[in-house]
Image (cartoon, helix red, strand yellow):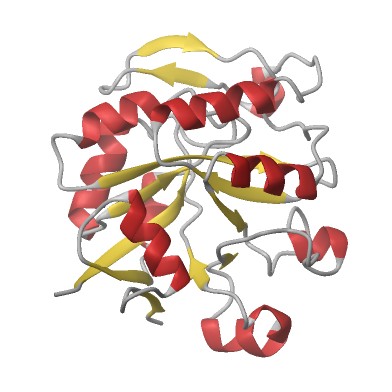
């Protein structure tokens, strides 16, 4: 028996300098509970430093947290990368950190990059400038994510900036992707009409929440047997009845 499962694969914590300080684990999880969201993709910019605490806190909720990151490629493309385990995402984080430029963040201009505990108490501040582009191409990101058996989703592809179509003009056939995300600025019908080349991919739409209020955007639903990474992958692939559905 498949269960309908509301999901949001694009949530930022206060680690992302462009996110509000209110985006702490307990607030995110309580907002998700209020909205009935069952699966959350945590994907801060070029870092996963708040993923472990999100996983720990989620154990007290009926919510599956997928460890992830929103990576900015050398072409300035934003790509969502998700992994099954904390170890996998930390290995990925080390790989990304090794390809970030040696620039320190200036919170006066870009915002603070807080590492917090579950209640939002500040444990540290990431000094690397997380809004910078890595030296990794989209193809290199795709290959490494594949090696780690992760999921790759080009983010908000309908946008003119920081999207794979906006930056490259198309989705290269050499890039192995599991789904395509469109933003809340466009309906599914208009997206499919405007970006018809993406219709061959599984589509999702996400809140891209940088504040709690943005988490009310909830239109993507998974049909799965249980809440785990394997079922998520099966839904993206449409295997054995699992599927993804967008409700406008």
Q: In which quarter of the image is residue 21?
A: top left
In the rendered structure, the answer to whether residue 124 lies left or right of residue 74 reads left
Q: Where is residue 108 in the image (x, y as percent from the top left)?
A: 67, 19
Residue 100, visible in the rendered structure:
yes
In the rendered structure, the answer to whether residue 38 lies left or right of residue 152 reads left
Q: Nearer the viewer, residue 79 or 22?
A: 79
Q: Position of residue 179 (x, y in %)?
A: 56, 65
* Quadrant in which the N terminus appears: bottom left
In the orientation shown, which residue stands out farthest toward the top? 124
Vertical relation: 108 (above or below) 82: above
Q: Position of residue 12 (x, y in %)?
A: 48, 40
Q: In which quarter of the image is residue 222?
A: bottom left
Q: Quadrant of residue 227?
A: bottom left
Q: Where is residue 86 in the image (x, y as percent from the top left)?
A: 40, 29
Which residue is found at the position 32% from the left and 31% from the top?
A: 54
Residue 182, visible in the rendered structure:
no
Which residue is found at the position 38% from the left and 18% from the top?
A: 116
């Amino acid at each position: 028996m498949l269960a309908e499962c509301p999901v949001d694969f694009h949530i930022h914590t206060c680690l992302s300098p462009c996110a509000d300080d209110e985006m702490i684990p307990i607030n995110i999880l309580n907002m998700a509970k209020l909205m009935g969201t069952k699966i959350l993709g945590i994907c801060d910019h070029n870092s996963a430093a708040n993923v472990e605490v999100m996983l720990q806190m989620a154990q007290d909720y009926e919510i599956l947290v997928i460890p992830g990151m929103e990576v900015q490629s050398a072409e300035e493309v934003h790509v969502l990368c998700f992994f099954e385990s904390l170890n996998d995402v930390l290995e990925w984080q080390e790989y990304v950190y090794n390809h970030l430029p040696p620039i320190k963040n200036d919170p006066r201009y870009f915002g603070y990059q807080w590492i917090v505990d579950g209640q939002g108490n500040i444990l540290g501040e990431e000094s690397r400038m997380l809004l910078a582009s890595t030296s990794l191409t989209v193809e290199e990101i795709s290959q490494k994510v594949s090696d780690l058996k992760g999921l790759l989703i080009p983010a908000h592809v309908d946008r003119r900036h920081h999207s794979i179509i906006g930056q490259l003009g198309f989705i290269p056939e050499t890039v192995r992707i599991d789904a395509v995300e469109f933003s809340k600025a466009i309906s599914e019908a208009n997206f499919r009409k405007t970006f018809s080349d993406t219709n061959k991919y599984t589509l999702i739409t996400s809140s891209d929440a940088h504040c709690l209020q943005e988490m009310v955007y909830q239109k993507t639903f998974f049909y799965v047997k249980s809440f785990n990474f394997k079922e998520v992958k099966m839904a993206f692939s449409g295997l054995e009845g699992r599927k993804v559905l967008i409700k406008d």
